[in-house]
Image (cartoon, rainbow, N blue to C red):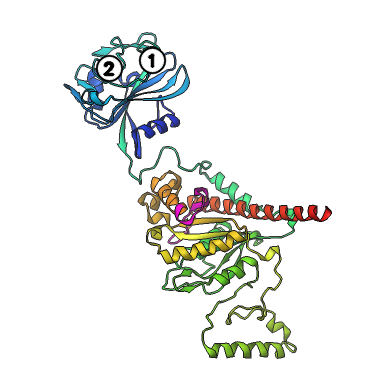
Amino acid sequence: MMAGLLQKEDFDELLKWIGGRRKFRLLYKITRDGCSAPTFHSKCDGKGMSVTVLSNPSDTVYGGFTSQSWTSAGAYVPDPKAFLFQLKFNGKSSYKQFAIKPEKIAYAVYCHSKYGPTFGDGYDLFTFSGNLTACNGEFKFEKGCSLDNTYNMKGTDYSAFANGNLQVKEMEVYQVDDCDMNDPLEIPWRRTPEWTTRLMQELKEEIENYKPLEQLKIQQTKILLIGQIGAGKSSFFNTINSIFRGYVTSQACSGTAEHSLTTQYRSYQVRNGPSRKPLNFRLCDTRGLEEGQGIEAQDVCYILDGHTPDKYVRQKNKTHITKICHCLYTEICRVVSFALPSLFTQFNPSLPLSSDIPGFIKAPKLKDRIHCVAFVLDASSVDIMSEQMLEKIKKLQTAMNQRGLPQVVLLTKIDKICASLQDDVGLTYYIPTAQEYVDKVSEMIGLPRSHVIPVKNYESERELNDNINILNLLAMQQILHFADDYLYNYLDDLDNEQIGTAD
């Protein structure tokens, strides 16, 4: 719970000092609960780690941390992890940590039923005893500080620590607890606008109105979806298609099977539902990556460079019979096409791709090429991805990098890695588990974390869901931005060539 004296950056600094993934819960606040030792103990005893924070009229904020529970025992409690700290001095940020002296660990905090939070032997920081009432909005803690007895103040004296007095406007005690990886954070780990129906409509309109760079005179950008079988490539197209159609669709074949359900290269249009007008990008789907089979690296390069016609099917050509059939087919095409040319202008998908087959784009233009690649990975299976599969992806990345192609990762099935997301994917950017998987995939694939985008495809749903829509529209927005980056680089190259020619 982050309400009261501290801002997000203050909690972040405390977390650096405390360590680990933690959450804070406000237990006690003197302006709310009263400045009373019995009340403090009733609310804070036995609660484990805690942070005590004080704020004075000079807007100086300071306090102490202990990893041990407060008690009413009337005894010192040892704590090697305890420390004092300062967060502000005279209204300005001043992040300072004062660790306990090794020889004084036994005197870290003093617990007494008649005392408020008390730190150190002597005492370094004594808050109050008994019951106090505010005067003009201020509480006067009379005992004061005997700094540097137990905690190493590094030369910081009473005046520099607390303005030389213990008159406070507020004191708060926060419980510091271990954070369950499925517990939502107070602040999202990746910031996005507030998720509302209005945001969803704005994202839809932005993508509907998207156009590639006007100077390059291409109507659509092309996005290649590539990934392991069952990861959700085709389902991502179906999901984006559903959002703009206005109902859940299944235009592309999707599901689970031993081998890829996608058997041909498809360059799918996404159409606006009411107008049926195609949007200015295509999602290109192809066979899934498999160990020992699946789409071949050479086929991917053909696709990247724009040689591959729509509806192309790659079949392995290992037997002599297949080679003979290929030769016979080519000869028949040559003879018969004179009489029936319209029958042979479309690519025959039953034969291996080569420059001799009708439909092969021998001189592809910019509009034929891929402008951004989206690797589609199943979040629930990244931990068991084989070295062979990772090596295959790395090899493809090398070909993409040579062509200057931007890459993203669509991390699908995030609802399978976190129970909280099964009910509401709107929590995606608040769930630490999702962040953990994004970080893990970023390191595996070698892309910046901002290039790894968690998504959830329509799978069991029969009706559209605003949060699923927003999650996928944010992904689509980023992909189109990256495709534009490629086009800007292409435009820069053209400009440089013209300058070079002029010189």
> What count of labels does the image hold?
2
Res 162 label: 1
Task: Check disc 2 and give the amino acid type.
Answer: Asn
Residue at the (58%, 82%) spot, across then down? 351
Where does the image place residue 450, in percent across and percent down from the top left? 52, 48
For the record, the magenta segment spans 443-462
Q: Residue 476 lies in magenta, yes or no? A: no
- Relative placement, left or right, of 475 versus 308 is left
Q: Nearer the viewer, residue 216 or 324?
A: 324
Where does the image place residue 391, in percent across and percent down from the top left? 46, 64
- For residue 184, what is the image quadrant? top left
Task: Check disc 1 and give the amino acid type.
Answer: Ala
**Please, is residue 427 above or below residue 97 in the view?**
below
Quadrant in which the N terminus appears = top left
Q: Residue 459 lies in magenta, yes or no? A: yes
Q: Secondary structure at mark 2?
A: loop
Res 149 label: 2
**Please, is residue 199 above or below residue 461 in the view?**
above
Depth-wise, is mark 2 or mark 1 nearer the camera?
2
The Cα–Cα distance between marks 2 and 1, rounded to whole angstroms, is 16 Å
